[in-house]
Amino acid sequence: MLEVTGVETFYGNIQALRGVDVSIQQGEIVTLIGANGAGKSTLLMTICGNPRAASGRIAFEERDITTLPTYEIVRLGIAQSPEGRRIFPRMTVLENLQIGATIAEETYYEEDVQRVFKLFPLLCERQHQRGGTLSGGEQQMLAIGRALMSRPKLLLLDEPSLGLAPRLVAQIFEVIKEINESEGVTIFLVEQNAYHALRLAHRAYVMANGNILLTGTGQELLENDEIRAAYLEGGARKTDVGQSGNA
Amino acid sequence: MTDIIARPLAGTRPFRLQGALKEAGLAAFVMFALSLALIAVRVEDVPGGLAIRWRPFDVIAAVVLVFLGRLGLAFLRNNRPAPVALASGLFSAVMALLLIVFVSGGGGVSWAQSLLPFSGFVVNVLVLIISLVLTLRAGLMWRRGERADAGTGVGDTMDRLAASVQGVAVYVIPVLLVAAIIFPFLPFADRRILDIAILVVTYVMLGWGLNIVVGLAGLLDLGYVAFYAVGAYAYALLATEMGIGFWLCLPFAGAMAALAGVLLGFPVLRLRGDYLAIVTLGFGEMIRIILLNWYEVTNGPDGISGIPRPTFFGLPFVRSPPEGVESFHSFFGLTYAPVDRIIFLYYVILAMALITNQFTLRIRKLPVGRAWEALREDETASRSLGINPRNTKLTAFGIGAMFGGFAGSFFATRQGFISPESFTFIESAVILAIVVLGGMGSQIGVVLAAVLLIGLPEMFRELQEFRMLAFGAAMVLIMIWRPRGLLAHREPTIRLFEKGAGKR
Ligand SMILES: Nc1ncnc2c1ncn2[C@@H]1O[C@H](COP(=O)(O)OP(=O)(O)O)[C@@H](O)[C@H]1O
Ligand SMILES: [Mg+2]
């Protein structure tokens, strides 16, 4: 469904991606884990064309999207819940969802709002609250809900569990699974919370310094010693795990 | 309510009188230093040249009042409202009494004048106003036993006021609307008042038009007057060169202005914030300089005169119409009154402004309007939700400019004469100030700000230079107390989502 081949991305002189290859099949949950600054968010943003890949190729459903502008890429059926949520703070929950539906057909609007409210009942209660006054968890739900409003085929999620209470983290991962299973949305999930992500994902990639280091099924990586040492043990939820926790 | 409860309890901090005195002394010193230049000397015209008049008493009064005022604020901040309320209340009462005696005596009551702290009438009025504000604040605080940090007390009050204004908007708006409609027939609405009202409504319309660009789409436009000018010149040229009437020209003038808006939009699409502001400022100046120098078409600095007045469905407002044309008063069997034309102009601009307003309110609920607001909030996020930033910004520039152009046509037909001088940067600044002070995106805020910034200074035209002083002071005060504008309150575009509406 999505083929990323040899993609390099720069921020000015800084190279953030050094030839990344990622492939995602229809219906999968694929996760991308890696330390802070590895280039995970950059990869998600590059898929959406902002920033644009300096070299390499990105294809979505066999179509080359490498040079398309963001708003056209999105129209093909890719939606993103970006890093830092980026909901519209002065607009209400419902208005945020409405803007999410910009590219969807109008006839689906009410049905889709109901769908999102069913996934996140809390948003229904808060529908007239301003986005900026929501709690972190609620904002995350809104960001995911807003992305879903465009009826995407592929949903890109950038660290949805960041800064959430453990109970909420479990809940969010539950919802992600549901979106994938009952709605048939393919999911590309960027996470630092490697344990949860690997358990949920069908397949996973590990990224460091702008390169893909490793790939395998979620289960394989969970059992991989290197991964355990670097991302799981002694600080599965810490952000920047070095090699310190070798138990 | 909660914000009051959440505050620390009253009187938790010990009050240090010494600190307060020091603070007040410092303020008084600054005032003294400033007053040496501003107040102490006055150059006057006397027979045979200029003379310098010293005003030592004014300096003393200024220093003492600033000292007391600062001390009062310090008391308030330390939650001691009672003495402040009493002292400033007493002072206000005395001042008001003296001023009333002075005014009712036709300015000739010398004992009242000598007791007033300043020699200038307006300054005395300003002092009275400040002291009344202080009394009010202290009084409110005293009654509630509420502790307020400097500034936030008023801010809270104004927040509540803004929220309640929005709350009662359902009632206020029809009342305002009816008032605006019957306004020309109110007893005090003489020709001068009507002229001021027309001016205010013109600026309300400009404010609403600019609000689309600045308030909704979040594009800081410092060159809005350019579109006003394009509209004015488009109408003036068409009318004087080709003899086309106002109503036929109006759409064309709007289209020209919209085109100018889109033209401006293209080069600035990639710019944000400050850079955008600078380029739009340049664009505004550019248009003015073109008008000034393109002599063959625009008649340069001489401007265009003899611009035809609008007609009432072809009926002109003149005493004796030309052969074969009937005039407004004879058609309706009225006696000729020059004020009819003014009233008509008032209704024209009122209708145009209301159309602008309705348009904005409607478009906010449409996908374009939502896209404007989304773009204002977060451009990156908007793009990744499928909003095309280029088209969205261009429509905002174009539509905003179009309303500026309509207002410009009206300006041309009202004045009968236009020249580049009417379209200087200061106009853009005033329109922007109306939008910002009103509270970006707030429709009713624009009305309030236009009345404050345009109406009041016009009403008090006699006060001359103090007008601008008060204007500046008002801006500073508003920005201190209401940094997001007088009535900054964004009304959601959707009210309620019916549960189960989609299921049927
Ligand atoms: N807007 C930017 N400008 C310059 N450098 C950036 C920008 N965004 C990210 N980077 C750099 O690119 C690298 C990858 O960042 P990012 O993709 O955010 O990592 P991750 O999401 O894995 O934590 C980092 O070194 C970061 O400093
Ligand atoms: Mg990141």
Image (tube, rainbow, N blue to C red):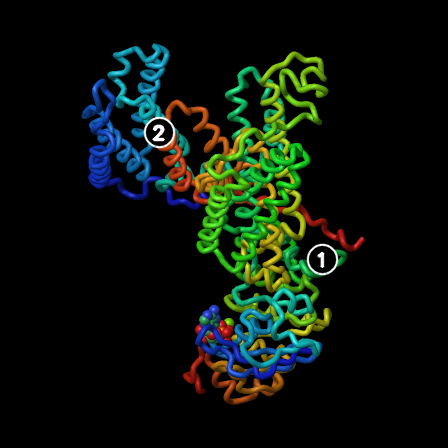
Residue kind at label 2, given as amino acid type: Glu
Residue B44, visible in the rendered structure: yes
Instruction: Residue at the far front: name it.
Output: B296
Q: Residue at x 67, y 47 (%)?
A: B496
Which quadrant holds residue B411?
top right
Which dot, 1 or 2, sits closer to the camera?
2
SS at circle 2:
helix
- Between B90 and B416, the one nearer to me in the picture: B416
Q: Residues within 10 Å of mark 2 (few under 14, many from 20)?
A: few
Q: Residues within 10 Å of mark 1 (few under 14, many from 20)?
A: many
Tell me: residue B405, above or below residue B261.
above
Q: Give the alpha-carbon distance from disc 1 to disc 2, as whole Å.
A: 61 Å
Residue kind at label 1, given as amino acid type: Gln
Q: Position of residue A213 (x, y in %)?
A: 53, 86
Does mark 2's beta carbon lie closer than 8 Å to ligand 1?
A: no
Which quadrant holds residue A47?
bottom right
Tell me: residue B192, above or below residue B173.
above
Instruction: Residue at the far right: name it.
Output: B504
Q: Position of residue B108 (x, y in %)?
A: 30, 11
Q: Circle 1 is placed at which residue position?
A: A114
Which label is found at residue B465? 2
Q: Residue at x 62, y 39 (%)?
A: B356
**Chain of the residue where label 2 is placed in the rendered structure:** B
Tell me: residue A108, above or below residue B350.
below
**Chain of the residue where label 1 is placed in the rendered structure:** A
Q: Is residue B322 left or right of residue B62?
A: right
Q: Residue at x 20, y 24 (%)?
A: B51
Looking at the rendered structure, whether the residues under marks 1 and 2 are on a common chain is answered as: no
- Between B16 and B393, the one nearer to me in the picture: B393
Which label is found at residue B308? none
- Between A165 and B411, the one nearer to me in the picture: B411
